[in-house]
Image (tube, helix red, strand yellow):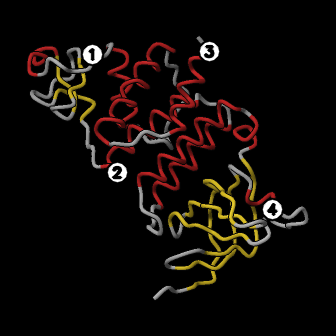
Amino acid sequence: MSQLVNADFTGMVMFAKNHRENDLLVKFLTREYGKRMFFIKNAKKKDFKLRSAILPFTHGRYSGLIRSNGLSYINAALDVKQFENIFQDIELNAYATFLLNLVDAAFDDNFKIEAWFDRLARALTLIDAGNDAEVITDLIQIQLLNSFGSAIVWDHCVVCGRRDLALDYSESRGGMLCQNHWHLDEHRWHLSVKAAKTMAMLSLVSIFKLGQISVSPATKREIWQLTERIYQDQVGINLKSRHFIDQMQNWAH
């Protein structure tokens, strides 16, 4: 039986969709209750008092009724703000939307994912502050692979453990192969030394300890192409928001 709890919670807007003539269904990622769908009555009316609190990329403290299963309800916005640069910039918006979509795909609704809420909030804060959106996105999508059941070894050869030789990615072996073992997978994905080292670093570093790092456009392109292949072939998801970033990157060339 579904239970209803009156609670304050920390949340961020993931997306909204129309519901009936004047209402919205807004999906939040909450720190305390996981992903929840909220029914917002009369949200499309001009005088709706919580309009700014449910805009895309809005986050903060809310008060509402949390239903264990089914739709929840928001009563008040206690202390909320928006990632304004992400909201206004099409490129930052694209990467942030992709990250939200990826987390949405990785976890079931109504399942508490406090650690990933904190990581995603930190990632969006860094992107909004002007840090390299693509690098931060790469970090999240590489580390999120474990939650999809793909525990990939990035920092050493899966056969011998060596880290000091050139490494290529092997899907069949579930990680990297050093050049001494490239013969084990003729279909391996070739990576430059810089790309392999950057992916290893991004797989291990905490988003909370990430400093300013400089990654060349060519290296970022390599990482993006490989992660795209992994998510398509191994994870089995093909997000529209990733395709939009692909299109956006092509505009720049």
Task: Determine which of the numbered discs, if any, sits on residue 44 in the image.
Answer: 4
* Label 2: element kind: helix
Which residue is under mark 3?
Answer: 252
Label 1 environment density (alpha carbons within 10 Å; few <14, some 14–19, many ≥20): some
Label 2 environment density (alpha carbons within 10 Å; few <14, some 14–19, many ≥20): few
* Label 4: element kind: loop
Q: Is residue 246 left or right of residue 94?
A: left
Q: Earlier in the sequence, mark 4 or mark 1?
A: 4
Alpha carbons under labels 1 and 2: distance apart: 25 Å
Quarter of the image for residue 10 reads: bottom right
Q: Residue furthest front?
A: 21
Residues tagged 4 and 1 counted as in contact (Cβ below 8 A): no
Which residue is under mark 1?
Answer: 190
Which residue is under mark 2?
Answer: 147
Type of amino acid at the residue the image marks with label 2? Ser
Q: Earlier in the sequence, mark 4 or mark 3?
A: 4
Quarter of the image for residue 13 reads: bottom right
Q: Position of residue 24 (x, y in %)?
A: 70, 64
Type of amino acid at the residue the image marks with label 4? Lys
Q: Earlier in the sequence, mark 3 or mark 1?
A: 1
Alpha carbons under labels 3 and 2: distance apart: 32 Å
Q: Is residue 14 left or right of residue 218?
A: right
* Label 3: element kind: loop
